[in-house]
Image (spheres, grey):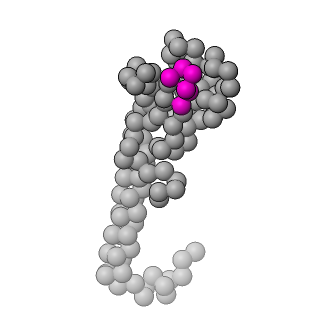
Amino acid sequence: MINQSLIKSFNKADIILIVILIVLICLSFFAITKKNQQTSYALCEIDGKVVKRILLSKSQRVDLKNGMELEIKNGRIRVSKSDCPQQICVKHGWLKYSSDIIVCVPNRCIIYTENKEEFDYISQ
């Protein structure tokens, strides 16, 4: 229960200030959630040419037709299969930050996210 003397001690300016703060908190929450819902893509370059632009919001598997297969899940991407000898691209795992990049030298392939204006954990 709210103490009645506490309620009586508020004047109109206090109530207006509380309402303004609540509205600002709600607006900032909606702005942050809307920014996080931006559609992001991954780009795959083979021999320096972009061959695929992949939507990261849709779970799927993509065959690059160069001996590599990509897996997209939960807005992230990784190389799930590759025919290169050392499998460094497969061992890299998921791209986590906007500055991450996967390079497979034997297949001459580079995979990176397109969002260049997004900050990663280190630059925040």
* Foreground pick, 23 / 117: 117
In the rendered image, residue 14, in percent from the top left (x then y), is placed at 36, 81
Task: Answer with the quarter of the image where residue 49 lies.
Answer: top left
Which residue is rendered at x = 37% and y = 70% of the image? 21
Quarter of the image with the N terminus is bottom right
Asked whether 20 or 86 is in front, the reply is 86
Query: At x 45% / y 21%, what residue is drawn?
Result: 46
Q: Is residue 16 left or right of residue 122?
A: left
| Viewer-closest of 14 and 1 | 14
Report the residue at 40% width, 36% height from top. 114
x 44%, y 51%: residue: 119
Image quadrant where residue 73 sits = top right
Give the image location of residue 87, x and y in percent.
66, 26
Bounds of the magenta span?
A: 103-108
Residue 15: quarter of image: bottom left
Q: Nearer the viewer, residue 66 or 36?
A: 66
Q: Is residue 34 left or right of residue 88?
A: left
* Residue 31 within the segment the image draws in magenta: no
Q: Position of residue 113 (x, y in %)?
A: 45, 36
Is 66 placed above or below 1 here?
A: above
